[in-house]
Image (cartoon, rainbow, N blue to C red):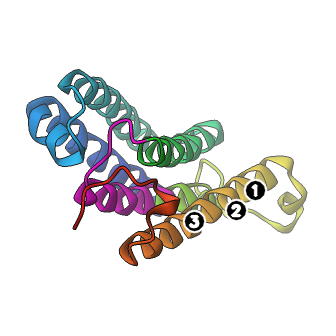
């Protein structure tokens, strides 16, 4: 359970850092990513700060509920999907540096989304799962969610590799030149 707490705190620190950056420097964030109005950066920043506070609070409790682990992993999956949507439709992330940074951050978020459910291999009190628990539907949900997010991470790495090869078909042709 210690490793899960550490991962949740790492996720919280990441959310809080990016959220504060979006709130305090919306023009710089918007310019780096492609020039979307700063109001969007404020909205993302507030959401990240709220999620970071929740992650921090959950990691400090005695027991972390399994549904929260699934919630955090699904949040990571949604972040990944949103990142790719913003890149492919050219609605906000339009610079080369913004695309690369977004894919790198999405890789990190996907990685945490994989590790959250997989690290919850112990019950909320810290005891390890015994053989009888292997048939538990809750364990399979966590495992299946980990597999889905792992597929997202693989797709991120592949997209980044294609982008660095200047194959912009996967990302659209809206980005600036190198």
- Residue at mark 3: 155
| Total tally of numbered discs in the picture | 3
Q: Mark 3 and mark 2 in contact (Cβ < 8 Å)?
A: no
Label 2: which secondary element: helix
Of callouts 2 and 3, the N-terminal one: 2
Start-end of magenta stretch: 90-110
Q: Residue 130 appears at what percent x and percent y?
A: 79, 65
Residue 127 seen in this snapshot: no
Q: Residue 47 appears at what percent x and percent y?
A: 35, 27
Q: Residue 156 appears at what percent x and percent y?
A: 50, 64
Of callouts 3 and 1, the N-terminal one: 1
Q: Which of marks 2 and 3 is in front?
A: 3
- Residue at mark 2: 147
Whether 71 is among the magenta residues is no
Residues packed near mark 1 inside 10 Å, few (<14), some (14 to 19) or many (20 plus): some
Q: Residue 125 appears at what percent x and percent y?
A: 59, 50
What residue is shown at x 44% (from left), y 46% (from top)?
83
Label 1: which secondary element: helix
Q: Mark 1 and mark 3 in contact (Cβ < 8 Å)?
A: no
Quadrant, the C terminus: bottom left
Position of 64 relative to 114 (above/below): above
- Residue at mark 1: 144
Residues packed near mark 2 inside 10 Å, few (<14), some (14 to 19) or many (20 plus): some
Residue 165 seen in this snapshot: yes
Position of 108 relative to 158 (above/below): above
Q: Mark 2 and mark 1 in contact (Cβ < 8 Å)?
A: yes
Q: Quadrant of residue 97?
A: bottom left
- Tell me how far mark 3 sits from mark 1, CA to CA: 17 Å
- Tell me how far mark 2 sits from mark 3, CA to CA: 12 Å
């Amino acid at each position: 359970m210690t490793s899960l707490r550490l991962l949740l705190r790492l996720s919280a620190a990441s959310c809080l850092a990016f959220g504060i950056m979006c709130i305090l420097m919306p023009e710089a964030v918007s310019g780096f990513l492609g020039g979307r109005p700063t109001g969007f950066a404020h909205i993302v920043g507030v959401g990240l700060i709220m999620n970071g506070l929740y992650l921090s609070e959950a990691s400090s409790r005695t027991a972390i509920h399994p549904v929260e682990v699934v919630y955090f992993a699904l949040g990571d999956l949604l972040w990944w999907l949103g990142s790719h949507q913003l890149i492919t439709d050219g609605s906000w992330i339009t610079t080369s540096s913004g695309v690369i940074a977004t894919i790198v951050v999405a890789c990190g978020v996907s990685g945490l989304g994989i590790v959250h459910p997989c690290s919850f291999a112990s019950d909320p009190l810290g005891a390890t799962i015994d053989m009888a628990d292997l048939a538990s539907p809750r364990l399979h949900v966590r495992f299946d969610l980990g597999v889905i997010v792992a597929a997202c991470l693989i797709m991120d790495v592949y997209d980044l590799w294609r982008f660095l090869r200047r194959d912009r078909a996967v990302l659209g042709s809206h980005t600036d030149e190198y």
